[in-house]
C-alpha cells in the first residue's frame, strides 16, 4: 500500500479497519524553547484519536539526520523500513512579538502580543510532497510579559492536526441515496465517520451513463450531517440540496457550513420626552437593518450580528453574540432556529440646542433570545422570519460635548428624549444564504 494515492488509501481504510493508513511524525526545525518530543507526542495523539490512522513511531530513525537537502531520500528510506503511507514533518518557528498601546479605563497601557507559527509538510511513502498546513497560536497581555512558547506551540499543533484531517485526509463514502431526508449509510466509525460530521454529497457514476434514467440518477447534490454512528453503519440527515432516490452518491467530509443573512428588523421603543417635546406621545419605531453570520449545523451553532437603525431624531448601532440550535421541521427546506446571547447598543440622538459641539449619546446592554423559521428556496438561498426578545438596560443618562471639549451629562432642556426604553419583543424578516 506504500505508493497508493491518499484518496485511495482512505477508501481502502473505509472498507476495513485493519487497512488504516500508517503515519509517522518527525520534527525538522523546532525553536529551541520548544520540546520536540512533546510536539511529536501531541501530533501522534491527535491522529490516534481521529481513528483514521495507525501511528508508527519513527523518532528513533529520524534523529538528527534529516536536512532540507536529503529529506526526500531519507523519508523514502524510513517509510520503506516502517511500511509507512504518510510522513508528517513539523516545523516550529521562532515566536513573533508585537507591542501596541491602547486605552484601558483612564490609562494608556502597552500590550504585548506573542504568536507562534507551526507548519506541517506531508509526504507520501516515496518522499513526494502531498500538501502543507500551517497554523498560528496567539497570546497577548499587558507588558512586561513573557509568553509560554511551549504552550502556544502545542495549541497550534492541535489545530494543525484538525485542519489536516479536513483538508488533506477527508473521509469519503459511497452509498445509494434512499427516499426522504434521512439516509442510511453502509459505513460507520470504522470508516472514520463521527456523529455531527458534515459531508458534501454529489451524484457519482462508475462509467458514462447509457440511458436517460441513469443520467437522472446523477442529479443528487447537497449537504448531509451524520446523526448517529455504529461501527459499520451510520445515519445522516439532509441539510440542504436534493438526493435522487436510488442514485449512487459520493459523500466527502466538508467544513462546517455557515449561514449569513440580511434582514429588516422593527424595534418598538418608548421614550420620555424632553422639555422640547412636551406633547410627544412617547413611542418610537426604530427601523433597523441587521446582518448576521453563524454556523449552520444541526445541533449547536454560534454566531453574531450587527444592526443599524434609525428613528425620528435618533439612530442606533448594535452588536450581538449568540449560541443556539437549528431544529429540522421538514428537512431540508424548513427548520426552526432558536438562539440566545448577549448584546449592546450605542444610541445617538439630536440635541434641541445649537450650543453643543456634539449630539447626545447613550449606551445599553443586556440579553436576547430569538425564535424563527428558516425556509430554503434553493440549495443555498432562503427566507427567514423571527421574533426576538431582548431585555436591555434603559438609557436615562446622555453624554454631550461642549465646544470647549468638555464632556458632560446632558440637561433635560437640551434633549428631545430624556429616557429610552426598548420594547421586550421585536420582529425581523429577510434573506439568508447557506454557505457550504
Image: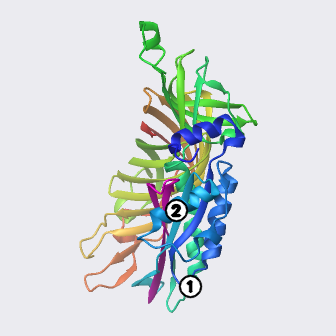
Residue 33, numbered label: 1
Q: Compared to 409, does 107 lie above or below?
A: below
Nearer the viewer's eye, disc 2 or disc 1? 2
* Residue situated in front as seen by the camera: 185 or 418: 185
Magenta span dominant secondary structure: strand
Q: Compared to 64, does 90 lie above or below?
A: above
Quadrant hosting residue 362: bottom left
Q: How is the image coloured?
A: rainbow
- The residue depicted at 26 percent of the width and 76 percent of the height is 357
Instruction: Report helix, strand or loop for mark 1.
Output: loop
Q: Position of residue 433 (x, y in %)?
A: 42, 38
Q: Position of residue 126 (x, y in %)?
A: 49, 53
**Whether residue 333 is visible:** no
Q: First in sequence: mark 2 or mark 1?
A: 1
Quadrant hosting residue 18: top right
| Residue receiving disc 2 | 75
Q: Dot 1, crowdedness within 10 Å: few (<14), some or many (≥20)? A: few
* Residue situated in front as seen by the camera: 139 or 177: 177
Q: Position of residue 285 (x, y in %)?
A: 41, 47
Q: CA distance from mark 2 to mark 1?
A: 26 Å
The magenta span reads 108-136
Quadrant hosting residue 196: top right
- The residue depicted at 35 percent of the width and 58 percent of the height is 314
Q: Is residue 73 magenta?
A: no
**Whether residue 408 is visible:** yes
Instruction: Report helix, strand or loop for mark 2.
Output: helix
Q: Compared to 206, does 59 lie above or below?
A: below
Residue lying farthest right?
Answer: 231
- The residue depicted at 65 percent of the width and 74 percent of the height is 38
Residue 104, numbered label: none
Q: Position of residue 48 (x, y in %)?
A: 69, 56
Amino acid at each position: 500500500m506504500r505508493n497508493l494515492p491518499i484518496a485511495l488509501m482512505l477508501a481502502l481504510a473505509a472498507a476495513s479497519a485493519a487497512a488504516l493508513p500508517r503515519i509517522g511524525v518527525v520534527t525538522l526545525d523546532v525553536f529551541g524553547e520548544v520540546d520536540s518530543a512533546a510536539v511529536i507526542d501531541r501530533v501522534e495523539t491527535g491522529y490516534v484519536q481521529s481513528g483514521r490512522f495507525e501511528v508508527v513511531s519513527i523518532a528513533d530513525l529520524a534523529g538528527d539526520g534529516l536536512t532540507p537537502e536529503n529529506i526526500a531520500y531519507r523519508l523514502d528510506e524510513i517509510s520503506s523500513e516502517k511500511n509507512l503511507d504518510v510522513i508528517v514533518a513539523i516545523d516550529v518557528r521562532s515566536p513573533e512579538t508585537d507591542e501596541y498601546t491602547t486605552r484601558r479605563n483612564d490609562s494608556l497601557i502597552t500590550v504585548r502580543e506573542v504568536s507562534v507559527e507551526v507548519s506541517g509538510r506531508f509526504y507520501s511513502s516515496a518522499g513526494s510532497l502531498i500538501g502543507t498546513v500551517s497554523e498560528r497560536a496567539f497570546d497577548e497581555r499587558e507588558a512586561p510579559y513573557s509568553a509560554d512558547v511551549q504552550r502556544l506551540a502545542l495549541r497550534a499543533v492541535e489545530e494543525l492536526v484538525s485542519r489536516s484531517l479536513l483538508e488533506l485526509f477527508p473521509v469519503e463514502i459511497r452509498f445509494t441515496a434512499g427516499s426522504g431526508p434521512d439516509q442510511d449509510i453502509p459505513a460507520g466509525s470504522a470508516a472514520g465517520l463521527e456523529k455531527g460530521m458534515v459531508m458534501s454529497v454529489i451524484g457519482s457514476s462508475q462509467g458514462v451513463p447509457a440511458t436517460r434514467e441513469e443520467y437522472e440518477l446523477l442529479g443528487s447534490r447537497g449537504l448531509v450531517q451524520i446523526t448517529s454512528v455504529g461501527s459499520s453503519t451510520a445515519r445522516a440527515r439532509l441539510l440542504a440540496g436534493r438526493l435522487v432516490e436510488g442514485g449512487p452518491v459520493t459523500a466527502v467530509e466538508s467544513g462546517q457550513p455557515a449561514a449569513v443573512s440580511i434582514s429588516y428588523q422593527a424595534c418598538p421603543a418608548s421614550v420620555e420626552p424632553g422639555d422640547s417635546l412636551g406633547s410627544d406621545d412617547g413611542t418610537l419605531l426604530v427601523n433597523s437593518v441587521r446582518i448576521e453570520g453563524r454556523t449552520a449545523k444541526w445541533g449547536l451553532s454560534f454566531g453574531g450580528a450587527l444592526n443599524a437603525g434609525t428613528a425620528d431624531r435618533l439612530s442606533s448601532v448594535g452588536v450581538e453574540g449568540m449560541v443556539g440550535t437549528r431544529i429540522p421541521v421538514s428537512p431540508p427546506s424548513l427548520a426552526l432556529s432558536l438562539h440566545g446571547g448577549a448584546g449592546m447598543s450605542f444610541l445617538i440622538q439630536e440635541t434641541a440646542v445649537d450650543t453643543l459641539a456634539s449630539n447626545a449619546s447613550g449606551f445599553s446592554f443586556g440579553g436576547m433570545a430569538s425564535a424563527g423559521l428558516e425556509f430554503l428556496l434553493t440549495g443555498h438561498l432562503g427566507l427567514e422570519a423571527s421574533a426576538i426578545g431582548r431585555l436591555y438596560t434603559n438609557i436615562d443618562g446622555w453624554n454631550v460635548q461642549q465646544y470647549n471639549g468638555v464632556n458632560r451629562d446632558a440637561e433635560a432642556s437640551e434633549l428631545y428624549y430624556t429616557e429610552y426604553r426598548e420594547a421586550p419583543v421585536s420582529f425581523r424578516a429577510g434573506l439568508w444564504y447557506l454557505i457550504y
